[in-house]
Amino acid sequence: MKIDFANLQKQHQLYKDEIESTVTDVMRQCNFIMGEPVQTLERSLEKFTGTKHAITCSSGTDALLLGMMALDIQPDDEIITTPFTFIATAETIAFLKAKPVFVDIDEKTYNIDPSKIEAKITDKTKAIMPVSLYGQPADMDSIQKIADKHNLKVIIDGAQSFGSTYKNKTDSNLGDISTTSFFPAKPLGCYGDGGAVFTNNIELAEKMKSLRLHGQSKRYQHQYIGMGGRLDTIQAAVLNVKLKYYAQDLKKRQEVAEKYNQSLKEKYQIPFIQEETTSAYAQYSIRVQNRDVLQARLKDKGIPTAVHYPMPLHLQECFQYLGYKEGDFPISEVVSDEIMSLPMNPYITNDEIEYIIKK
Ligand SMILES: *Cc1c(COP(=O)(O)O)cnc(C)c1O
């Protein structure tokens, strides 16, 4: 058997007619930038997430930049985040010349541990940036409580968690600003780069709309230093089709996770989902002791695996200047050594799941 990790081919085959026809429409109309499908998508995203304002943009990375720029993050401001995430989380903080301040993760959810945040707050701290890792929102009530007490903003890196829920709200509603990514391999992926920011605050929404268009207020009049951060019309057209089926995709991801859980829970540490929380299961990751051996053996049997992520950010060369060392975040470090992701997508068959479990 040859298993596909993300099954993008299968997904395209499934929605091929609709997607190819809508993309052809964009090509024929030549409305490549900010065409009507972009506005349609934004209204649909608002409806799907229950958020007042959805603003699409060029990637999940740019969504983080737009969010922090809207919150007026300045050089030397400190933003508290997790070292156990994709590089973009802390990279964008550093890109704005602010300082990423790391806090270790919770042993079970792998998300930022709220009980360790307050010790890292200084008079330079401006925001907390939790990541909804593998698709699961962090312990947001605890984080929001700390933010309120210390007058900090909360911006969520929701690149992996579109459609996940926390206490009956989608994670797009949490914090001051929440972001997501439409990178092809994310739960809701487009056919290139794309992303979005969400907020329930009208002023932040208006500012992010402007920042995405070079900070313009009117054509050729620029209120802010912004960026070229729009989503292509072609990508919006693709997403308009895929969003129609996304609730079903999410359900299937959760069913796949449940099947894995039932068979793997005796032997491995399976994903731990907090109460009143659902995960979008961007990844299904378990902890294993003999990762290299196991990965090689599975590869031999046609089963691809991946590691999200093999090196925590405080140990990355680009962050040496922050002065962290090995041992500073022991949970992030041990999880980086043991975590392994299995094939996860809505199209994986029962036979394939059984085969993977057996091997
Ligand atoms: C994918 C990802 C990003 C970046 O999204 P892009 O659309 O690839 O720029 C940021 N943060 C996390 C946690 C991610 O997984």
Image: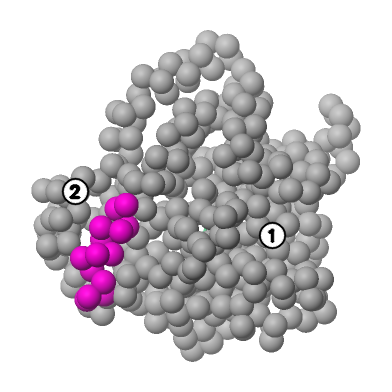
| Pointer 2 or 1: first along the chain | 1
Crowd rating for badge 2 (residues with CA inside 10 Å; few <14, some 14–19, many 20+): few
Residue 131 against residue 269 in the figure, above or below: above
Residue at horizontal 22 percent and vertical 76 percent from the top? 267
* Residue 56 visible in the displayed image: no
Residue at horizontal 38 percent and vertical 57 percent from the top? 283
- Mark 2 vs mark 1, CA separation in Å: 37 Å
Q: Residue furthest bottom?
A: 327
Residue at horizontal 41 percent and vertical 55 percent from the top? 281
Q: Amino acid at mark 2?
A: Asn
Asked if the residue at tag 1 contacts the one at tag 2, i.e. Cβ–Cβ closer than 8 Å, the answer is no
Kindly identify which residue carries mark 1: 175
Please provide percent x and percent y for residue 149: 79, 76
Query: Residue 9: which quarter of the image?
Result: top left
Is residue 307 found left or right of 31 in the rendered image? left
Please provide percent x and percent y for residue 102: 61, 76
The overriding secondary structure of the stretch rendered in magenta is helix
Please provide percent x and percent y for residue 101: 65, 76
Magenta run includes residue 264: yes
Query: Residue 75: which quarter of the image?
Result: bottom right
Query: Residue 337: which quarter of the image?
Result: bottom left
Please provide percent x and percent y for residue 338: 33, 76
Kindly identify which residue carries mark 2: 350
Q: Which residues are magenta?
A: 255-268
Does the beta carbon at disc 2 come under 8 Å from ligand 1?
Answer: no
Is residue 300 found left or right of 158 in the rendered image? left
Residue 160 against residue 248 in the figure, above or below: below
Give the position of the C terminus as an image quadrant: bottom left
Is residue 9 found left or right of 142 in the rendered image? left
Residue 163 against residue 260 in the figure, above or below: above
